[in-house]
Image (tube, rainbow, N blue to C red):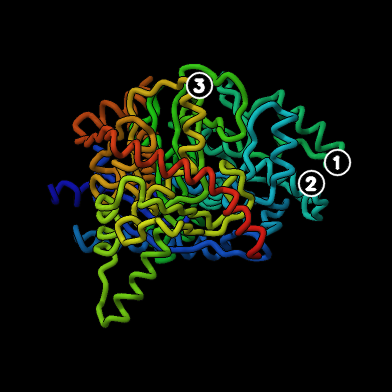
Amino acid sequence: MEETIKKAIAAGEAVLGIELGSTRIKAVLIDENGTPIASGDHGWENRLENGLWTYTLEDVWTGLQDAYAHMAEDVKEKYGVEVTSFRAMGFSAMMHGYMAFDQEGELLVPFRTWRNTNTQQAAEELTELLQFNIPQRWSVAHLYQAILNGEEHVSRISFLTTLAGYVHWKLTGKKVLGIGDAAGMFPIDSTTNTYDQAMLTAFDQRAAEKGFDKKLESLLPQVLLAGEDAGTLTAEGAKLLDPTGRLQPGIPVCPPEGDAGTGMAATNSVAVRTGNVSAGTSVFAMFVLEKALSRCYPEIDMVTTPTGKPVAMVHCNNCTNEINAWAGVFRGFLEALGQKPDMNAVYTAMFRSALDGEKDAGELTLYNFLSGEPVAGMTEGRPLLVRTPEARLNFANFMTAQLYSAVAALKLGMDILAREQVAVDRLLGHGGYFKTPEVGQRVMAAAMGAPVSVMETAGEGGPWGMALLASYAVRKQPGQSLEDYLEQKIFAGQKVETIAPRAEDVEGFQAFMERYKKGLSAERAAVDALR
């Protein structure tokens, strides 16, 4: 087996997927069957500068280069060969946000990420205008808010894109975007698989009234479906990704996607009546719809699969960030005791302890809002633990509250889809929240009120999903759909663990949610008081 992999890598037959997540950039190399054979990653953090969450372009490229280099080192260590080429490659990243460039290709203002919640006025006006939910983090909301603010740079915008679209452009020269990522910039018409023309016209008319004379469609990337030609790696792009000069140009690069699309691919959730929950720094649940929702909901995003099928998505800005912060506290405690902590063991202990907590988290109430949370009506966040004198504060209950809080805002949106009777045959989880066996699944099943399945590859997440999309682009049979390719080629023999909700877990989570909803006014007071 190892010799086969070695030959495939040496012959340039492996496929590479790289995803720029919120806290980690990860590269995953797969063989022709979709099996991960090497990986590398790079940790990074967003910065709060001038009141806005951002990453610098230097952060982007040093991070990509480091993740790629670690993948190449992993290949060298495992198989004794140098990486010089791939059968295909693809790049994905956190969706939405605002990257505006001038005619010379220079970034006009620092990258504004999905985490920013400074676009409330724009989001509300556009939602009313288009009768389509435009969340605060969508690219068009950021653009319109900049127009409303009278920001000087808007007159000089020549191109708008997402982080994945930016990376793809610099590596291939192509200003394109996968349809799933494009659906987080501006609404998509799933009958034409491009931007909704009527909505574009409405936006242009409204923006012109505010003094913006450009046509939005001329600024947006071209929309592509999974499997379509998105260009090849240029010589400049190869040097940018791999400064050692070993990587050769000419490699096909598939349409860039957002982390929602790669999550769907990684969980085989691109067919109608399938759904998935991605839980990491942020959390979102997506369901491929049979029919449209009865009306527009501000809590529900309408996006698409990588092939353009309509998807209802509940997206929450905050998930494991507070758990990660407390892991750092516990690490410091262990170091103060003279120990050298194994962080995998720390996280495992934290998650496993949640199963020992009382089902209602000992009447603790916890909010994990590091940033704003529109689903809960929060424009800013302040992590907050509240307890009455009767509440039982211990480590197990504390961790139960942490895991509940991580998905509580998601539950607020999920209740809407339940009322809409959205049907799902299969719900799969992936991301760091599910890394510890059983724990995250049990909590999520209690929150969703439905069985949650996790595959062996759940921990691989988005970068693996991106590699699968790149593989599909070059290895699909004529006329083969992405759904069929994933079902028949990738997931046919995949081991799946399913956990159904337990009555006592559901009851305990509901008790937590009742306190959570009642206590939101305390969270609002904390935001107002602590600035």
Task: Name the quadrant containing residue 123.
Answer: top right
The amino acid type of the residue labelled 3 equals Glu
- Give the answer, above or below, for where 81 lies relative to 252: below
- Residue at figure coordinates x 83%, y 39% from the top left: 213
Q: Position of residue 468 (x, y in %)?
A: 35, 38
| Left or right, 140 with reference to 37 | right
Q: Position of residue 141 (x, y in %)?
A: 68, 42
Between the residue at mark 1 and the residue at mark 2, the CA separation in whole angstroms equals 7 Å
Give 76 or 483, whichever is nearer the viewer.
483
- Give the answer, above or below, for where 464 lies relative to 342: above
Residue under numbered circle 3: 420
Between the residue at mark 1 and the residue at mark 3, the CA separation in whole angstroms equals 37 Å
The reply to whether discs 1 and 2 touch (Cβ–Cβ < 8 Å) is yes
| Left or right, 124 with reference to 360 | right
Q: Secondary structure at mark 3?
A: loop
Upstream in sequence: badge 1 or badge 2: 2
Residue under numbered circle 2: 147
- Residue at figure coordinates x 66%, y 65% from the top left: 531
- Give the answer, above or below, for where 338 lies relative to 389: below
Between the residue at mark 3 and the residue at mark 2, the CA separation in whole angstroms equals 35 Å
The amino acid type of the residue labelled 1 equals Lys
Give 110 or 480, whichever is nearer the viewer.
110
Q: Position of residue 415 (x, y in %)?
A: 48, 31
Upstream in sequence: badge 3 or badge 2: 2
Comparing marks 3 and 2, which lies closer to the viewer? Answer: 3
Could you say which disc has been placed on residue 210 in the image?
1
- Residue at figure coordinates x 46%, y 63% from the top left: 44
